[in-house]
Image: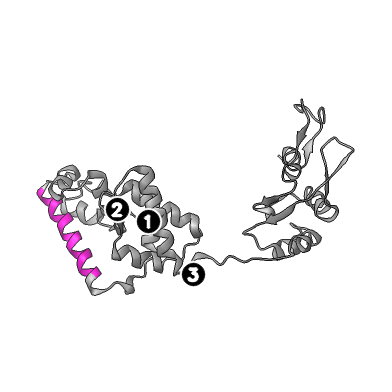
């Protein structure tokens, strides 16, 4: 809540509100002589924005329920993913606070605008998660390298990290395969960018899966055994490759694709 957030930033005196059983220093006081980082500053409530402005202007803070100002010698770094200029126009952010924060501005471009970083970051997150999960993963397949470079990554680095974690958790091979990636990433791949080689590989996979289902009498567990795959992995392949209808048709609508 705003009240507790104010107490967290500025601290409070004993008895300032219900539950304030002792005096507490705020984050600004604790940062004395150093740096305080305010992440997502664009989400700060309008009622708290003038109080932050006062800290920046006067270099002092006052605890909730207190009457004494505490001088501050701190550096303030703030970050946001919001368009603060637009928030100012809509009345969600104070213009004077924006200009007071915007002494030195650093812009971090989205991942889609620095594609050369994508493979490097992907390998880093992949190895970090593999070590944590105690799985042996050597890298990305060429198909995956192509897919992650084509994707726009609306969730930026966090989305890339999550995609690599998913690949480690769900994958069964030493290389990350397209089937290990999130569906949103696979669905965004431009159909006309597939090379002849990739199309041939995809067709061979499809034929192998359909043949295994036929041999296994429509049982996905038997089909997985024939293919030498984990049943859950086969089900993901079927879903990602859009083979449910073909499998159901193959087995006269028996629902073999689950």
Q: Which of marks 1 and 2 is nearer the N terminus?
A: 1
Q: Residue at x 23, y 64 (%)?
A: 202
- The verdict on residue 50 being magenta is no
Judge from the rendering whether residue 221 lies leftward or rightward of residue 99; answer left or right.
Answer: left
Front of the two marks 2 and 3: 3
Front of the two marks 3 and 1: 3
**From which residue to which does the magenta span run?**
198-215
Q: Earlier in the sequence, mark 3 or mark 1?
A: 3
Q: How far apart are marks 2 and 3 (CA)?
A: 31 Å
x, y percentage for residue 252? 17, 50
- Numbered circle sitting on residue 98: none
Describe the element under mark 1 as helix, strand or loop: helix
Asked whether disc 1 touches disc 2, contact meaning CB atoms under 8 Å apart, the reply is: yes
Q: Residue tagged by mark 1?
A: 183
Q: Distance between the residues labelled 3 and 1?
A: 23 Å
Q: Residue tagged by mark 3?
A: 114
């Amino acid at each position: 809540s705003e009240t507790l957030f104010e107490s967290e930033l500025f601290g409070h005196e004993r008895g300032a509100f219900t539950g304030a059983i002792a005096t507490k220093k705020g984050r600004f006081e604790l940062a004395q002589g150093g740096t305080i980082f305010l992440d997502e500053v664009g989400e700060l409530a309008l009622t708290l924005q003038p109080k932050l402005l006062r800290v920046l202007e006067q270099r002092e803070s006052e605890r909730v329920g207190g009457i004494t100002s505490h001088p501050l010698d701190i550096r303030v770094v703030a970050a946001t993913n919001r368009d603060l200029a637009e928030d100012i126009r809509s009345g969600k952010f104070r213009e004077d606070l924006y200009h007071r924060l915007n002494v030195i501005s650093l812009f971090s471009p989205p991942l889609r605008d620095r594609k050369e970083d994508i493979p490097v970051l992907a390998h880093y997150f992949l190895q970090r998660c593999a070590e944590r999960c105690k799985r042996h993963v050597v890298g990305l397949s060429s198909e995956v390298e192509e897919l992650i470079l084509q994707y726009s990554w609306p969730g930026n680095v966090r989305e890339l990290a999550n995609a690599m974690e998913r690949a480690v958790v769900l994958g069964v091979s030493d290389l990350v395969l397209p089937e290990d990636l999130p569906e949103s990433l696979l669905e965004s791949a431009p159909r006309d960018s597939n090379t002849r080689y990739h199309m041939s590989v995809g067709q061979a996979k499809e034929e192998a899966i359909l043949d295994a289902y036929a041999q296994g009498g429509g049982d996905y567990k038997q089909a997985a055994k024939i293919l030498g795959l984990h049943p859950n992995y086969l089900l993901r392949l079927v879903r990602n490759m859009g083979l449910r209808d073909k499998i159901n048709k193959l087995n006269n609508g028996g629902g073999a694709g689950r």
